Image: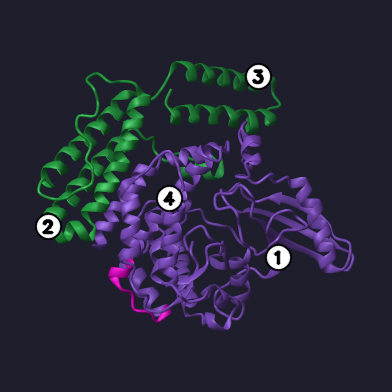
Amino acid sequence: MQPIKRSDENAHAAAGRLPGSVVDDDIMQSALAVHLGRKFGNEVEICSFARKSSGFSWITYSFVARSPSMADRKLILRIGPPNGLFAPYSVLPQVYALQSMPGTRVPVPGLVTFDQNGAEIGFPFFICEHVEGDVPAPWAGSQLDEGHRRGIAGQFIAILGELHKVDWKETPLAILNGAGNERGEVGAIAAWRASLARPTARYYPLLDWGGRWLKDNCPVPPRRTVVHGDYRIGNFLEDDRKITAILDWELTHLGDPHEDLAWALMPTFNAGSRKFYGVVERDEVIELYQKASGIAVSRKSLAFYEAYALYQAAAIQMCAVRAFEVDRFNDMRMAVMATQMASIVRAFDRALEAVA
Amino acid sequence: MSKSFDLLIDGMIDALRAHVLPKSGDDFARGQVFSVIFALNGLKLAADWKAGPLQEEVRLQDTAFFEVRRLAAKMQHPPIPATPRMEAGLADPVRLETLRDEGDRQLGELLFWATGEGALAADRDTAKEIERALRGFIREQLKVEIGITAKSMLHQIATGEEQRQ
């Protein structure tokens, strides 16, 4: 379900502070047929069009493209809605990642087409091949047997190592390197700080102060690698006990590989457990990762990025708070996210103490 | 009514009107939704946050300000509010929420000051002690908020599926 703006929508829109439209699935389907018809050079019928998620950010659809000139193709459409948590959206990091991974040992869905401007559909979007498999939800992990989870965890860590071995300089991801005037990882912290500095009703002193501490104490990466940015249980497909695709590359950037490792280890993404996927001890994860990546893990850097993970989690929650309180989107999930702020800030403070 | 309470009730009403009512084909279910909206409108007129936790937060902030003033007596420091900021018996959630929010910003300023180069150069040990004290009081304040926060329903919120806890 897509949030829409509350009753003062018009006043806000007139002030130029809000995007002016919401996502209509019927219009989306028609526009998609036009776009793919042009892309494939023949009339295309869109069948079995369905929203796959009601997420807080990108909206995902599955569908079948049917055309007289080709066999049916099962495809996935992802669009960046104008009123998502991190709007305005760019498809480019995801596109560069999907373009860069073929030929590596990091499985990703094949990219079919994309449009950053979203002229035909109305929103930035990309389309990729459907990959067989299910997304295991972090909170449902314990329903799978331990052997199953250990097998998946091992693959997941090995793929992370492979990702961090990718020579990005020879791929489309190189464009994310920017002008090279500032360390990318420091710039990323500054960007979250800027996001948190936007006006909301609540101000959390520890969050503000801790953000500056992170910026001032950001460690130098052992190697500048591709960072997935949201590498965790729940962001991959598995089929018959095999990981078939790594998903959700929207936060991909270049930076410190410890960032992905710390994010994956967050208890929130492991059914509340300190063990990875609830089954692999932290030390074993580090050992497996080092073997797969060839990167020596620094305990201090890992602790730093565990604090940074909580800082990012808090910043994301504050985006939800802002969407509800300032932009007035009537999605109650965002209001509820706001209620978790105190717990996250406390965990962040503890993590900072562990680094210092 | 305090601003955040007002926003929350308005958000609930708008969410029901925009997302639930249009998909409620059953007359009885629609009647239930309209009744909830009516009840929420009533709450808007009659209810507000409980004063107790807000008073506790403001008290903790005041203790922090008092302690920082004592520790920083011989240092140049940013303005520290005079305490107590609450008059006896203050129970108006609007005023309390405003005091709490102002207090958070002032605590933030003091924390930045205590960990800044100026304070550390002037008296490193005292500055460190002030940092510890401030962080401790802010943590205590977070505990008050955590104590009135319902358990997270991440799975249900994200997927719309009910999960047995």
Q: Chain of mark 3?
A: B
SS at circle 1: strand
Chain ID for green: B
Residue type (three-letter) at the residue carrying disc 1: Phe
Q: On the same chain: label 4 and label 2? A: no
Mark 4 and mark 1: span between their CA atoms?
A: 32 Å
Q: Chain of mark 1?
A: A
Q: Residue A106, located in which quarter of the rendered image?
A: bottom right
Q: Is residue A273 left or right of residue A138?
A: left
Residue type (three-letter) at the residue carrying disc 2: Asp
- Residue under label 1, please give it: A114
- Residue under label 3, please give it: B28
On residue A197, the disc is 4
Neighbor class of circle 1 (other Cα within 10 Å; few <14, some 14-19, many 20+) is some
- Residue under label 2, please give it: B123
Quadrant containing the N terminus of chain B in the rendered view: top left
**The stretch drawn in magenta includes residue B106:** no
Q: Residue at x 33, y 71 (%)?
A: A219
Upstream in sequence: badge 3 or badge 2: 3
Q: Nearer the viewer, residue A85 or A217?
A: A217
Neighbor class of circle 4 (other Cα within 10 Å; few <14, some 14-19, many 20+) is few
